[in-house]
Amino acid sequence: TAPDGLEKVNPKAREQHPTHWTQSVQAIAEILAKHQPRVILFPHDLDWNSTHVGTHLLVMDALKSLPTSFSCYTVETEFWGQNPSPNLMVELSAQHVADLITALTFHIGEVRRNPYHLSLPAWMIDNVRRGAELVGGQGGAAPDYTFATLYRLRKWCDGKLANVYAGGRYLSCAEKPESLFA
Protein backbone atom coordinates (compact mmCIF):
# COMPACT_ATOMS: atom_id res chain seq x y z
CA THR A 1 0.00 0.00 0.00
CA ALA A 2 0.99 3.66 0.08
CA PRO A 3 3.16 4.90 2.99
CA ASP A 4 0.04 6.15 4.77
CA GLY A 5 -2.28 3.38 3.58
CA LEU A 6 -4.84 3.50 0.80
CA GLU A 7 -6.92 6.57 0.01
CA LYS A 8 -10.32 6.94 -1.67
CA VAL A 9 -11.64 3.57 -0.57
CA ASN A 10 -15.36 4.08 -1.11
CA PRO A 11 -18.04 3.11 -3.65
CA LYS A 12 -17.88 6.50 -5.39
CA ALA A 13 -14.13 6.17 -6.02
CA ARG A 14 -14.65 2.62 -7.30
CA GLU A 15 -17.10 3.94 -9.87
CA GLN A 16 -15.45 7.24 -10.80
CA HIS A 17 -11.73 6.39 -10.57
CA PRO A 18 -11.32 2.88 -12.01
CA THR A 19 -7.55 3.14 -12.54
CA HIS A 20 -6.96 4.15 -8.92
CA TRP A 21 -9.38 1.46 -7.75
CA THR A 22 -7.64 -1.24 -9.79
CA GLN A 23 -4.29 -0.24 -8.27
CA SER A 24 -5.78 -0.48 -4.78
CA VAL A 25 -7.29 -3.89 -5.55
CA GLN A 26 -3.91 -5.08 -6.82
CA ALA A 27 -2.20 -3.84 -3.64
CA ILE A 28 -4.59 -5.82 -1.44
CA ALA A 29 -4.44 -8.88 -3.71
CA GLU A 30 -0.63 -8.84 -3.50
CA ILE A 31 -0.77 -8.71 0.30
CA LEU A 32 -3.23 -11.61 0.41
CA ALA A 33 -1.19 -13.68 -2.08
CA LYS A 34 2.07 -13.01 -0.24
CA HIS A 35 0.86 -13.68 3.30
CA GLN A 36 -1.80 -16.35 2.60
CA PRO A 37 -3.85 -15.42 5.69
CA ARG A 38 -6.04 -18.08 7.20
CA VAL A 39 -8.61 -15.46 8.25
CA ILE A 40 -9.38 -11.90 7.16
CA LEU A 41 -11.71 -9.44 8.89
CA PHE A 42 -13.43 -6.59 7.06
CA PRO A 43 -16.75 -4.68 7.22
CA HIS A 44 -19.91 -6.27 5.83
CA ASP A 45 -21.42 -4.89 2.63
CA LEU A 46 -24.16 -2.81 4.31
CA ASP A 47 -22.08 -1.21 7.09
CA TRP A 48 -23.34 2.21 5.95
CA ASN A 49 -20.11 4.24 6.36
CA SER A 50 -18.76 4.82 2.84
CA THR A 51 -15.21 3.82 3.80
CA HIS A 52 -16.48 0.65 5.47
CA VAL A 53 -18.55 -0.26 2.40
CA GLY A 54 -15.59 0.65 0.19
CA THR A 55 -13.32 -1.59 2.24
CA HIS A 56 -15.78 -4.45 1.77
CA LEU A 57 -15.84 -3.89 -1.99
CA LEU A 58 -12.05 -3.58 -2.14
CA VAL A 59 -11.45 -6.84 -0.28
CA MET A 60 -14.07 -8.68 -2.34
CA ASP A 61 -12.60 -7.37 -5.61
CA ALA A 62 -9.12 -8.42 -4.43
CA LEU A 63 -10.36 -11.91 -3.53
CA LYS A 64 -12.04 -12.25 -6.93
CA SER A 65 -8.78 -11.32 -8.66
CA LEU A 66 -6.82 -14.14 -7.00
CA PRO A 67 -6.48 -17.67 -8.41
CA THR A 68 -9.35 -19.98 -7.46
CA SER A 69 -6.86 -22.03 -5.43
CA PHE A 70 -6.66 -19.20 -2.86
CA SER A 71 -8.81 -19.81 0.20
CA CYS A 72 -9.33 -18.21 3.59
CA TYR A 73 -12.03 -17.60 6.13
CA THR A 74 -13.77 -14.23 5.98
CA VAL A 75 -15.16 -12.55 9.07
CA GLU A 76 -17.42 -9.62 8.21
CA THR A 77 -17.69 -7.04 10.97
CA GLU A 78 -20.40 -4.49 11.74
CA PHE A 79 -20.16 -1.05 13.26
CA TRP A 80 -22.24 1.71 11.65
CA GLY A 81 -24.86 -0.50 10.07
CA GLN A 82 -26.22 -3.74 11.47
CA ASN A 83 -25.43 -6.89 9.56
CA PRO A 84 -28.80 -8.37 8.56
CA SER A 85 -27.43 -11.92 8.52
CA PRO A 86 -24.78 -12.56 11.18
CA ASN A 87 -24.00 -16.19 11.93
CA LEU A 88 -21.50 -15.76 14.75
CA MET A 89 -21.85 -14.19 18.20
CA VAL A 90 -18.63 -13.75 20.17
CA GLU A 91 -18.85 -13.11 23.91
CA LEU A 92 -16.76 -10.26 25.31
CA SER A 93 -15.67 -9.94 28.92
CA ALA A 94 -16.00 -6.68 30.84
CA GLN A 95 -12.22 -6.29 30.45
CA HIS A 96 -12.49 -6.71 26.65
CA VAL A 97 -15.11 -3.95 26.53
CA ALA A 98 -13.02 -1.68 28.77
CA ASP A 99 -10.02 -2.23 26.47
CA LEU A 100 -12.14 -1.40 23.40
CA ILE A 101 -13.41 1.81 25.00
CA THR A 102 -9.86 2.80 25.90
CA ALA A 103 -8.67 2.12 22.36
CA LEU A 104 -11.53 4.16 20.88
CA THR A 105 -10.60 7.18 23.00
CA PHE A 106 -7.43 7.45 20.90
CA HIS A 107 -9.60 8.01 17.81
CA ILE A 108 -9.63 11.62 18.99
CA GLY A 109 -11.18 13.39 16.02
CA GLU A 110 -13.98 10.85 15.74
CA VAL A 111 -14.97 10.71 19.39
CA ARG A 112 -14.79 14.49 19.72
CA ARG A 113 -17.30 14.73 16.87
CA ASN A 114 -19.39 11.76 18.01
CA PRO A 115 -18.55 10.23 21.42
CA TYR A 116 -19.76 6.76 20.43
CA HIS A 117 -17.24 5.13 22.77
CA LEU A 118 -19.59 6.08 25.62
CA SER A 119 -22.44 4.00 24.21
CA LEU A 120 -20.28 1.01 23.26
CA PRO A 121 -21.27 -1.11 26.30
CA ALA A 122 -24.98 -0.61 25.54
CA TRP A 123 -24.41 -1.71 21.94
CA MET A 124 -22.51 -4.81 23.08
CA ILE A 125 -25.34 -5.65 25.49
CA ASP A 126 -27.92 -5.23 22.71
CA ASN A 127 -25.87 -7.55 20.50
CA VAL A 128 -26.63 -10.37 22.94
CA ARG A 129 -30.36 -9.74 22.45
CA ARG A 130 -30.06 -9.48 18.65
CA GLY A 131 -27.61 -12.35 18.38
CA ALA A 132 -29.79 -14.72 20.37
CA GLU A 133 -32.46 -14.40 17.66
CA LEU A 134 -30.37 -13.80 14.53
CA VAL A 135 -27.53 -16.22 15.25
CA GLY A 136 -29.20 -18.66 17.63
CA GLY A 137 -32.55 -18.75 15.87
CA GLN A 138 -35.91 -17.25 16.71
CA GLY A 139 -37.37 -18.48 19.95
CA GLY A 140 -34.16 -20.11 21.18
CA ALA A 141 -32.60 -19.51 24.57
CA ALA A 142 -30.13 -16.64 24.75
CA PRO A 143 -26.62 -17.45 25.96
CA ASP A 144 -25.60 -16.20 29.38
CA TYR A 145 -23.47 -13.36 27.97
CA THR A 146 -23.44 -9.73 29.06
CA PHE A 147 -21.51 -8.37 26.06
CA ALA A 148 -21.05 -9.69 22.53
CA THR A 149 -20.12 -8.77 18.99
CA LEU A 150 -21.81 -10.14 15.89
CA TYR A 151 -20.10 -11.29 12.72
CA ARG A 152 -20.74 -13.16 9.49
CA LEU A 153 -18.22 -15.98 9.11
CA ARG A 154 -17.83 -17.55 5.68
CA LYS A 155 -15.07 -19.19 3.69
CA TRP A 156 -13.59 -17.95 0.42
CA CYS A 157 -12.83 -20.99 -1.74
CA ASP A 158 -13.05 -21.82 -5.43
CA GLY A 159 -13.41 -18.13 -6.24
CA LYS A 160 -16.53 -17.49 -4.15
CA LEU A 161 -17.89 -17.19 -0.63
CA ALA A 162 -19.36 -20.29 0.97
CA ASN A 163 -21.34 -20.61 4.18
CA VAL A 164 -19.51 -22.28 7.04
CA TYR A 165 -22.51 -23.01 9.24
CA ALA A 166 -26.00 -24.19 8.39
CA GLY A 167 -27.24 -22.04 11.26
CA GLY A 168 -25.21 -19.93 13.64
CA ARG A 169 -22.50 -20.31 16.24
CA TYR A 170 -21.77 -18.80 19.64
CA LEU A 171 -18.21 -18.40 20.90
CA SER A 172 -17.86 -17.86 24.64
CA CYS A 173 -14.89 -16.25 26.37
CA ALA A 174 -13.94 -19.73 27.60
CA GLU A 175 -13.55 -21.12 24.07
CA LYS A 176 -10.52 -20.76 21.84
CA PRO A 177 -11.22 -18.65 18.72
CA GLU A 178 -9.24 -21.03 16.52
CA SER A 179 -12.07 -23.54 17.03
CA LEU A 180 -14.06 -21.43 14.56
CA PHE A 181 -11.66 -22.26 11.75
CA ALA A 182 -11.23 -26.01 12.19
Image (spheres, rainbow, N blue to C red):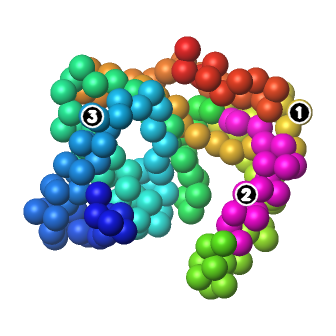
Q: Are marks 1 and 3 in contact (CB under 8 Å)?
A: no
Q: Nearest to the eye among marks 2 and 1: give it.
A: 2
Instruction: Looking at this view, name the residue that lies furthest to the left.
Output: 19
Q: Are marks 2 and 1 in contact (CB under 8 Å)?
A: no
Q: From mark 2 to mark 1, how far is it between C-alphas?
A: 21 Å
Number of marks in the image? 3
Read off the magenta span: 89-105
Q: Quadrant of residue 106?
A: bottom right
In the rendering, at what x and y percent does residue 36 appear? 35, 30
Which residue lies at the image location 46% right of the left edge and 47% below the top edge?
42
Which residue lies at the image location 89% right of the left edge and 33% below the top edge?
144
| Image vertical order of residue 116 relative to residue 73, above or below | below
Instruction: Looking at this view, name the residue that lies furthest to the top.
Output: 182
> In the drawing, what numbered circle is on residue 103?
none
Which residue lies at the image location 35% right of the left edge and 59% below the top edge?
54
Q: From mark 1 to mark 3, how far is it between C-alphas?
A: 40 Å
Q: Which residue is mark 1?
A: 144
Specify few, some or many for label 2: CA neighbours under 10 Å numbering under 14, 14-19, or 20 or more.
some
In the rendering, at what x and y percent does residue 124 appear? 76, 52
| Image vertical order of residue 75 relative to residue 110, above or below | above
What amino acid is labelled 3 in the image? Ala
Specify few, some or many for label 1: CA neighbours under 10 Å numbering under 14, 14-19, or 20 or more.
few
Q: Nearest to the eye among marks 1 and 3: give it.
A: 3
In the rendering, at what x and y percent does residue 20 appear? 16, 64
Q: Is residue 27 visible?
A: yes
Mark 1 vs 3, N-terminal side: 3
Label 1 sits on a secondary structure element that is: loop
Q: Which residue is mark 3?
A: 33
